[in-house]
Image: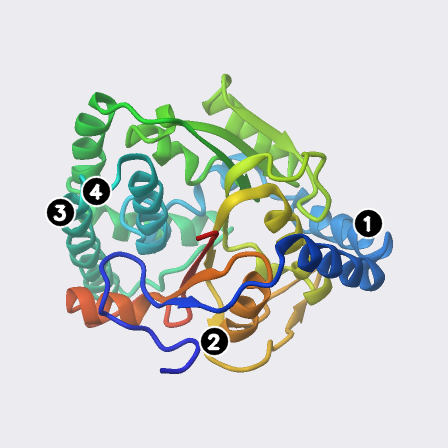
Amino acid sequence: MSAAEPSASTPGLLLRMRRAARPAARVVRRLGRGVARRVGGVIPGRERARLRRSWASIPAETLDDYLVTGYQNPRINAQSILARHFLIGKLFGSEFDELMRDELVFCVEANAALRQEARKLGVKMGQFLTPEKRAEVKRVSEVVAERETTFETKWAEVLPARAATPLRVLELACGSANDYRFLDSYGIARSLDYTGVDLNDSNIANARKRFPDVTFETGNILSLPYADESFDYVLAFDIFEHLSLEAMERAMSEAMRLARRGVVFAFFIMVDKPDHNVRPKANYHWNELSATRIRDLLQRRFPSVTVTHIPTFLRTEYAATHSYNPKAWSVIAERV
């Protein structure tokens, strides 16, 4: 089996790959020194400024909803669902495995309904900043509107009745609480000590408006002020592809430094190739990241790495005939 070839032999997230772990402290120091030599104080400052400029003109109301509609709706998005399932598993063990599987069946059905409705209406689906295109995506999404809260309701009924030792969780590039709002509504957040960080002030303002009692902070994910291993898990959704390779390594180094138990990452552009494909665009990037190289990078800190190609996972486990994004991957790295 190749490094990024998915397997359907285990439930939940797939492809657990283990290699002999190097001494963690030595590796992290070496990784940190290497990234510091390449990045220094230049890339963080300049790249941070470019990224801030790229979002500065976008209205707060646009930031609040453009990544939670259509296929990206965390209620029916497989990567968001799998991340929630991972946290539920860590909090409550295997108690809810059957409900998890039912939710992924629902995910496949809902995505198929969206695809069929989009074709019927002649609408191109995506994450758009223009109001007209976002309105079209919302019009398509009405086809699942009555059903989209089905599992949100089910989880909210069962999870508050269960006690668990809270997990400390940090989310990088949390946006306008894009995924946290569903950690909350599904009943997971009550068992989390959560912190969300984002570079954009409007995103943080939106998140704080929704959740004034939750910690949301404006911050640079290339250099964060928290102590080593301050969190049990670090989450990140769809951010690393937008960074230069130097900054991406720096951000991942920060995530690895801060995570005591592991990291959970979702990628929207990843490929089963040996090398990254760098694709600059204006003030940021749309890089194709190599599943092999990302896995190897994470294994410097965490000996257990699970790499899941989402379309293959949904096809082999749930007979999904279509995936909205053929380059979607999710990665979990943990200590054993």
Q: Is residue 34 above or below residue 73?
A: below
Q: Position of residue 16 (x, y in %)?
A: 37, 65
Total count of labels: 4
Residue closest to the eye, 149 or 26: 26
Q: Nearer the viewer, mark 1 or mark 3?
A: 3
At numbered mark 3, what does the secondary structure look like: helix, strand or loop? helix
Residue closest to the eye, 13 or 181: 13
Give the labeled residue for mark 4.
Answer: 148
Give the labeled residue for mark 3.
Answer: 98
Q: Decide which of tag 4 and tag 2 comes sooner along the chain.
A: 4
Q: CA distance from mark 4 to mark 2?
A: 30 Å
Identified at 29% across, 44% down, the residue is 75
Identified at 39% across, 44% down, the residue is 68
Q: Decide which of tag 1 and tag 3 comes sooner along the chain.
A: 1
Q: Could you classify mark 1 by the number of other residues whose Cα lies within 10 Å: few (under 14), some (14-19), or many (20 or more)? A: few
Q: Decide which of tag 2 and tag 3 comes sooner along the chain.
A: 3
Residue closest to the eye, 157 or 117: 157
At numbered mark 1, what does the secondary structure look like: helix, strand or loop? helix
Give the labeled residue for mark 1.
Answer: 45
Q: Is residue 24 above or below residue 299?
A: above
Q: Quadrant of residue 184?
A: top left
Q: Position of residue 222 (x, y in %)?
A: 71, 49
Q: Is residue 149 above or below residue 321?
A: above
Q: Decide which of tag 1 and tag 4 comes sooner along the chain.
A: 1
Q: Decide which of tag 2 and tag 1 comes sooner along the chain.
A: 1
